[in-house]
């Protein structure tokens, strides 16, 4: 058949591989494909799913050309999505196939969902009536169809009763469409009355949706100002217009409360999309999004690559959150790519944050994003009063990490039957273990980082590569027993101190590595919200978006922690994290306090957090970035070279540098050891490419990589456009 139609029609197919572009395949006679069709094609000895791409198939020796095996019965990937894939690949300097791979994340979904067997009344009545049959007939009187098991369940009879009725033609079998993952949300279901500020903000968003076309908007409002409530109105308007909506959240697996809230507003939950979905659920969601049956998805960054049939709005909640950056295979920032997606799809994108990123604030300042401000908390809730505790003046007792002032504040909070949160962004018991006899420090055998003691697990763990080993009893260097000393605190150690100080209080540690995983964390977040804990000790997990109505004290154990590292983003991150975490307090009108333990209360970042003067923080931070030509005033990219030996990695990095094409507006810094010089046994060197705002960094790096020697052996090179740390 294939030979008959010589020369065959040839189409490009993008396969989920790190190939430089699509491969050409022949379309067998009688097969109908179009750009976007999802097809099965041979690739070497295997069969893989790929997407028919735009343009002409390349010139291939017809003898070598292989035919497409199968076209899946699946909606084609829309043109917008294909352009998005190309755009992301070009911007991030990734292979387009690797971006397509993110679209094709649910292989079983390409075949239609299996229909469910159902039954429906025919109008005939059974020859012999029994009590059981009567019940079945009563329930089905309205003529609606049922699944066999659903009907048996609802009428309380065994399925054999129903089979008997089918045999007598009282019911006939039909094929039912598989049930939707979630019900269709109703934009008019449970709208709250908005405050004046909220209403004005919601009007701006709705106007953008009515106007149609692309626009970026930023809801910049303090914690608890009701941003969610405001963007729900935009969601409602997009739904009324018949468009699909994507809500991106940084920690969707842990924001179950958000789903409840959505349900209160829209009468049904959004479909979830994140890494913890079961494979079956993934397939169903993917398919139903492609078919347009799912109208709203709440998802992690990867939801951006779902093949929406008619996406008309993206919300990026907590747009500043580092979790939006993927640093694996395709390095991308989902916040920025969401804006691109809106641009390509010609619809509005709404970013929301209490502590917007400096990049986003500059975009707003320069008029690219429309900024909508919500300056005060909703209703009578007041922001917490923030104060520093000067650790030089109020030092903790020996072996303790909580100053007397903080302990007293916790006592007062408990006496009022309210909740306290102690925040320390460090997992485990102690970040370093030291032998007091010989000074040996426990280091990860595969990384340049210290092993962190986890007392609950009785292990030393590496937070970078996952290496772990049983907690030792003796020093491996000198053999001394019982002289291993934990240095510095992690949340587990703070919890130990809290339990000793407040034995009566109910305490909960919230940290991503406590036993029980996400399920346990969800239960605990729920328990805290219900007031079933008195003192919560948590890492940055607790900072994110949660509403704890009875929490009136937030104590930051070490406000200086994030400021110590040399990263130019340290100030921004610390400002965001501490504003967010103290923002957990006082969400329901009770008076609340945030206390920051610090050795440098006069530090400008600490000062702007405590004074609540966000504007001075942004003004200073933006000024410094501009002076140093750092993003968003200049452009940056990292080129990280890794290899099994240090010499190989460093040598190749130097060769890359020498391969740089001439460019007056672009400078290369390094190579220097990457922020983690050894990771999972691989040595890492980094070049930083710095350019002016208008520089073509991508073009420059592409040329550089083309001119450099090929990667051999264990060498790997990856490019990180707009790196998080610089
Ligand atoms: P943000 O997202 O800005 O932190 P939220 O949207 O979570 O703020 O609102 C803070 C609290 O105020 C929530 O408990 C929310 O239910 C409540 N809230 C906000 N706006 C309204 C409103 N218009 N009507 C009733 N409750 C509201
Ligand atoms: Zn490690």
Image: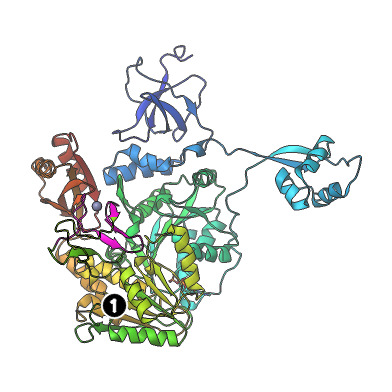
Residue 513 relative to residue 136: left or right:
left
Q: Position of residue 341 (x, y in %)?
A: 39, 50
Q: Which of 193 and 207 is in front in this view?
A: 193
Residues rendered magenta in the picture: 440-469
Question: Quadrant of residue 623 in the image?
Answer: bottom left
| Horizontal and vertical percent position of residue 595 | 31, 81
- In what element is the residue under mark 1? helix
**Can the viewer see residue 180?**
yes
At horizontal 46% and vertical 30% (from top left) the residue drawn is 39
Residue that lies at the very extreme toward the right in this rendered image: 128
Query: Could you tell me residue 3's position as x and y percent?
Result: 44, 12
Q: Does the magenta stretch include residue 461?
A: yes
Mark 1 sits near ligand 1, with its Cβ under 8 Å away = no
Q: Quadrant of residue 376?
A: bottom left
Question: Which is nearer the eye, 305 or 516?
Answer: 516
- Residue 591 vertical placement versus 704 (above, below): below
Q: Is residue 186 left or right of residue 635?
A: right
Where the C terminus falls, by quadrant?
Answer: bottom left
Residue 18 sits in which quadrant? top left
Q: Is residue 600 magenta?
A: no
The residue indicated by pointer 1 is 609
Q: Residues within 10 Å of mark 1 (few under 14, many from 20)?
A: many
Which scheme is used to colour this image of the protein? rainbow
Asked if residue 55 lies left or right of residue 281, the reply is left
Return the x and y of residue 473 as percentages of the image width and height. 25, 60
Task: Judge whether residue 315 can be spotted in this image.
Answer: no
Q: Which of 415 and 673 is in front in this view?
A: 415
Camera-side residue of 318 and 698: 318
């Amino acid at each position: 058949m294939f030979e008959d139609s010589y020369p065959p029609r040839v189409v490009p197919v993008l396969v989920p591989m790190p190939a430089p572009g699509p491969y050409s395949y022949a379309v067998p006679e009688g097969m109908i494909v179009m750009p976007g069709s999802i097809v099965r094609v041979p690739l070497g000895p295997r069969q893989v799913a790929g997407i028919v791409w735009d343009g002409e198939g390349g010139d291939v020796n017809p003898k070598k050309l292989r035919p497409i095996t199968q076209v899946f019965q699946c909606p084609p990937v829309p043109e917008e999505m294909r352009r998005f894939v190309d755009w992301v690949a070009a911007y991030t300097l990734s292979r387009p196939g690797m971006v397509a791979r993110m679209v094709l994340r649910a292989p079983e979904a390409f075949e239609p969902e299996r229909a469910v067997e159902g039954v429906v009344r025919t109008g005939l009545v059974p020859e012999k009536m029994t009590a059981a049959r009567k019940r079945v007939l009563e329930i089905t009187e309205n003529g609606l169809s049922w699944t066999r098991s659903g009907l048996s369940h609802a009428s309380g009879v065994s399925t054999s009763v129903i089979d008997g009725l089918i045999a007598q033609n009282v019911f006939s079998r039909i094929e039912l469409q598989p049930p939707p993952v979630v019900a269709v949300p109703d934009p008019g279901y449970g709208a709250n009355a908005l405050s004046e500020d909220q209403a004005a903000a919601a009007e701006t968003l709705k106007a953008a949706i009515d106007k149609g076309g692309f626009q970026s908007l930023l809801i910049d409002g303090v914690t608890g100002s009701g941003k969610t409530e405001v963007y729900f109105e935009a969601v409602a308007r997009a739904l009324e217009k018949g468009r699909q909506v994507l809500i991106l959240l940084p920690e969707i697996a842990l924001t179950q409360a958000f789903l409840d809230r959505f349900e209160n507003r829209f009468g049904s939950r959004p479909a979830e999309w994140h890494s913890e979905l079961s494979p079956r659920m993934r397939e169903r969601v993917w398919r139903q999004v492609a078919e347009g049956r799912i109208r709203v998805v709440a998802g992690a960054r990867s939801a951006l690559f779902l093949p929406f049939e008619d996406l008309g709005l993206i919300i990026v909640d907590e747009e500043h959150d580092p979790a939006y950056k993927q640093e694996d295979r395709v390095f991308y920032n989902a916040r920025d790519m969401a804006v691109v997606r809106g641009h390509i799809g010609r619809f509005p994108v709404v970013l929301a944050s209490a502590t917007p990123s400096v990049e986003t604030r500059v975009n707003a300042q320069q008029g690219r994003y429309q900024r909508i401000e919500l300056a005060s908390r909703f209703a009578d809730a007041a922001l917490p009063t923030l104060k520093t505790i000067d650790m030089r003046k109020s030092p903790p007792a020996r072996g303790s990490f909580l100053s007397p002032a903080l302990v007293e504040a916790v006592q007062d909070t408990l006496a009022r039957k309210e909740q306290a949160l102690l925040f320390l962004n460090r997992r485990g018991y102690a970040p370093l273990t030291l032998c007091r006899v010989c000074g040996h420090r426990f280091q990860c055998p595969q990384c340049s980082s210290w092993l962190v003691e986890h007392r609950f697990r009785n292990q030393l763990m590496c937070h970078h590569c996952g290496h772990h080993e049983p907690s030792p009893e003796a020093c491996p260097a000198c053999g001394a027993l019982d002289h291993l000393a934990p240095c510095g605190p992690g949340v587990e150690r703070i919890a130990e101190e809290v339990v000793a100080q407040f034995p009566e209080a109910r305490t909960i540690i919230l940290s991503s590595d406590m036993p029980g995983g996400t399920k346990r964390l969800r239960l605990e977040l729920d328990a805290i919200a219900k007031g079933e804990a008195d003192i919560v000790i948590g890492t940055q997990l607790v900072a994110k978006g949660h509403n704890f109505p009875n929490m009136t004290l937030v104590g930051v154990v070490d406000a200086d922690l994030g400021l110590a590292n040399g990263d130019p983003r340290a100030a921004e991150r610390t400002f965001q994290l501490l504003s967010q975490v103290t923002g957990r307090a006082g969400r329901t009108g009770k008076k609340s306090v945030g206390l920051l333990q610090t050795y440098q209360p006069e530090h400008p970042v600490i000062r702007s957090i405590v004074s609540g003067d966000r504007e001075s923080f942004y003004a200073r931070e933006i000024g410094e970035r501009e002076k140093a030509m750092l993003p968003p005033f200049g452009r940056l990219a990292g080129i990280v070279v890794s290899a099994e030996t240090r010499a190989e990695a460093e040598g190749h990095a130097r060769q890359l540098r020498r391969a740089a094409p001439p460019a007056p507006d672009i400078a290369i810094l390094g190579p220097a050891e990457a922020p983690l010089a050894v990771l999972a046994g691989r040595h890492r060197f980094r070049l930083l490419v710095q350019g002016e705002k208008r520089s073509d960094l991508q073009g420059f790096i592409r040329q550089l990589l083309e001119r450099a020697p090929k990667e051999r052996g264990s060498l790997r090179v990856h490019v990180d456009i707009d790196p998080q740390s610089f």
